[in-house]
Amino acid sequence: MGSKKHRGKTSLKTRLILAFVATSIIPIILLNLFSYYNTSGIVRDNVDELTQMNVLQTRASLDVWLDSYEDILFQIYMDDDIVELVKKINRQEDLSVSRNQLRRTLRGLFYTKEYVKCITVLTENGDMVFYDLLTGSMTQTSWLDDFSLDRSALYELISGDNNTHVISTEKAKTINAEENYLFHLGHRIIDYKNVNEQLGVVIVSVDEQLLKGVCSSNEKDANSFNFIVDAAGRLVSYRNNALVGEQIIDWSDDVQERQAAYGEFIAERNVFSGEYSSVIVVHDDKLNWDVVNVTNQNEVITRLKGQQKVMIVALGLSLGALVILIVVLIRSLSGSLHNLAAVMKQAGKGNLAARVTIDKKMPAEVETIANKFNTMLGELADSIDKEKEATKRQKDAEIAALEAQINPHFLYNTLDTINWMAIDRDAFEISNSIGALAAILRYGIDNSNSMVTVRQECDWLRQYLFLQQTRLKNTFECEVHVTPEAMDCPIHKLLLQPFVENSIIHGFDGVMRTHRLTVNIVLDGQMLDIIIFDNGKGIPAPAVDAMNKGIFEKTMEKNHIGMENAITRIHMYYEQAQVKIESEQGEFTRIHIRIPVIREAPPQPDLRPDGEAPPTEEAQLSVAL
């Protein structure tokens, strides 16, 4: 019978071998086939990440360097002596002396920074005073005659505001067969005694070699270089000086489009051979320039291909050894599993005393299973005994639950009888209190974790406050304000009662002034804003800070336990709930609760014991006791 039962089925050993081949060998082969593409992608991502950091560092260095040259500009346009000399030139007062003094002052600033090539002052009346290190001339600058803007347009550009203007690189005059490229920093000259007076502008011309040095300072090798492009798409700095100042792209606010355009620019000029090049763009918001990095990844990809060939050879050798190892291991595993299955068969027939024998040849994994199985058999025997005991206790609990169902009805009926007894004796205040108490008990006992509307919760809160007023001889004033749009918002039952009770019982304790308690409920978008305020004795500041952090001091005082349970309950019901406690000792306590509005149809319990019609919406907007 046993042989017929297993006829046509493969053995565990065969299944394990097939499973191992399917789950290990085949995936390894497939993984190797695609590893080149995956690995190359990871490597390129890592290179791009490192390159991104390189470009960010270059941008930071660029800002630091230009800030240092902007300091020279600041020294000039805020210098009192220079301001007075410019004023004299504008007034044509001692013109020759003033111009010479200003030129000597500008000359003295050249030695503070290496790459400053010219400092030019354009005055309001159209005069120009400069010192040019390249030409050494007093009448001709190295850049202004061939500049793309004429002198008046340049003056209008810089003098129009109080900002520093960075003007992109353009080719200057060729001096001693050496081509020069300059970019410029300009600012309006300011007299701090009359900041609105137009005196002139100062322009510091800086050698483009500064930008080239910043771009190359973080380059790792010849397969990567940086360049700079301004907001007009023109090259500000590039390793080939002949292209500096040319427009290489049409500017776009989309950085992805600019990145693609830079890639096309590099590809058209065959900067790197091969197909694996990456372009990284980082925009400098201060200068409104793009810092662009181009990296040649062909060498990395070539190395990956060589490594892939080595992996294929190693894989073929390791697969042969792996198959042999699998057969040996599975033979040992299948024997241990056979012994384990025999004991399981005995246990299946009801022999819970059977145990798996542990031997040294058993693999560690099977030994773990055997130990767990032996433990499980022992626990199963204990569980059967416990189940018998639990069955008996369940029956006892069911009987107790049936008895408990009688108690609420008995309590309501008894309160109703007492209520009519009070009415017969014209004790209407007692009757109202009993009616309110019955409504409170019915509301609290009937599915206490269910959802109700804010209207229903406020109806119940009105009954509760009425009883507290009666119990405490009207020693406090209370107002409940609810906006109309918040009335029908769903809320969990009894969410506000612990905070209100804490104010009445503990907040007003020992306070001699008139006690006031207010509850405000407002719908703010998809959030319900609830503020509970009392002018009681307040809470010490350390305790407030601790409670706002979710830390509650371990104590048996009911107010601490009630506050902790109430706040915990709110966070259990609402993931986005916010509870903030504000208090000033001796003055007030304010509880601010924000909970999301959960749109579901809550039940509609009637809290009015006498069956009267519910009050109108307008009547419930503000309830004062």
Image (cartoon, helix red, strand yellow):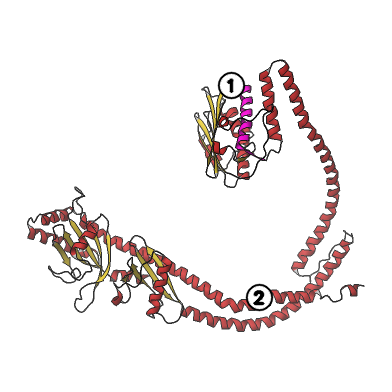
Quick one: label 1 or label 2, which is nearer the N terminus? 2
Give, as a three-letter code, the residue at label 1: Asn
Using the rendered view, name the quadrant where residue 9 is placed. Answer: bottom right
Q: Which quarter of the rendered picture does the C terminus lie within?
A: top right
Q: Nearer the viewer, residue 50 or 229?
A: 229
The image shows residue 116, relative to residue 304, as above or below, that is: above
Nearer the camera: disc 1 or disc 2: 1
The residue lying at 71 percent from left, 32 percent from top is 442
Magenta extent: 450-472
The residue lying at 81 percent from left, 40 percent from top is 397
Using the rendered view, name the quadrant where residue 248 is placed. Answer: bottom left
- Residue 400 image position (x, y, % from top left): 81, 37
Left or right, 599 with respect to 235, comes to right
The image shows residue 491, relative to residue 163, as above or below, that is: above
The residue lying at 78 percent from left, 61 percent from top is 372
Give, as a three-letter code, the residue at label 2: Pro
Whether the magenta-drawn stretch holds residue 541 is answered as no
- Residue 234 image position (x, y, % from top left): 32, 70
Left or right, 444 with respect to 186, comes to right
Characterize the local packing of mark 2: few (<14), some (14-19) or many (20 or more) Cα atoms within 10 angstroms. few
Which residue is denoted by mark 2 in the rendering?
27
- Residue 301 image position (x, y, % from top left): 50, 79
Residue 534 shows in this picture: yes
Which residue is denoted by mark 1 in the rendering?
474
The numbered disc on residue 283 is none
- Residue 334 image position (x, y, % from top left): 80, 73
